[in-house]
Image (spheres, rainbow, N blue to C red):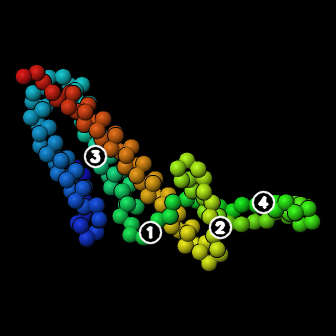
Amino acid sequence: MIPPPAEPSVNPCYPVLSKLYHFYLDSCLSASYSVNNMQNKTDIQTLSRLRQDLRRLVVELERSIKPVFGRGPLVKGTVCELARKCGKPSCACSRGELHHSTVLSWSHKGKTKLMSIPLERLMELREKSEEYRRLRSARAEVSASAKKMLAAIDQIERIRREEP
């Protein structure tokens, strides 16, 4: 049996996880009804495995969703350093000493945009862009977990469903 989610003061995603946890408890209580009505031992074992998978996915979802509850601003893009030649024949860059600049790179309507970053804003924009990347990564993980959960729930439904 998995423990209930932490209280709201400790866990900002308490409402979502609380509902999932109560769904899990309800499914455990209805499991005895299902076992009595099903004859196939393989189905019972499959249901047990699927329920364990769901429990694991709920824990994974709780871990994945934490970056979504951040309060700081985000900046779409990546901070990177460019090295270029200016094109002047008498410049040092024509001999291999390239000009370096730090930029924020992001895509907008299918095109890559670049913005020069002043040195005083470098750390700020780097942190905000990294937070954006963490949020997008969390979104992808939540989406993948949701797909897996729905697949498991659909499988449970197919196994438990009987003709009227």
Relative to 148, is 36 above or below? above
Rendering quarter of residue 151: top left
User: Residue flagged by tag 3: what amino acid is it?
Assistant: Arg
- Disc 3 crowd rating (10 Å Cα; few below 14, some 14-19, many 20+) is some
In the picture of the structure, the residue carrying the numbered disc 3 is: 55
The numbered mark, 3 or 2, whose residue comes first in the sequence reads 3
Residue at the location (25% across, 55% down)?
17
Secondary structure of the residue carrying tag 4 is strand
| Other-residue count near label 4 (Cα within 10 Å), few / some / many at <14 / 14–19 / ≥20 | few
- Pointer 1 and pointer 3: residues touching (CB < 8 Å)? no
Which circle, 2 or 1, is nearer the viewer? Answer: 2
Mark seen at residue 116: 2
Secondary structure, mark 3, is helix
- Choose mark 3 or mark 2, whichever is in front: 2
**On screen, residue 90 above or below 20:** below
Q: Disc 3 versus disc 2: distance between alpha carbons?
A: 47 Å
Q: Earlier in the sequence, mark 1 or mark 4?
A: 1
Quarter where residue 50 is shown? top left
Residue 4 visible here: no
Q: Distance between the residues labelled 2 and 1?
A: 19 Å
Corner quadrant of residue 53: top left
Residue 82 position in % (x across, y down): 72, 60
What amino acid is labelled 1 in the image?
Pro
Q: Badge 4 is on which residue? A: 84
Callout 4, which amino acid? Arg
Q: Which of marks 1 and 3 is in front?
A: 1
Classify 10 Å Cα crowding around label 2: few (below 14), some (14-19), many (20 and above). some
Q: Earlier in the sequence, mark 1 or mark 3?
A: 3
- Residue 73, disc: 1
> Quick check: can you spot residue 122?
yes
How far apart are the two marked residues, 1 and 3, measured between alpha carbons?
33 Å
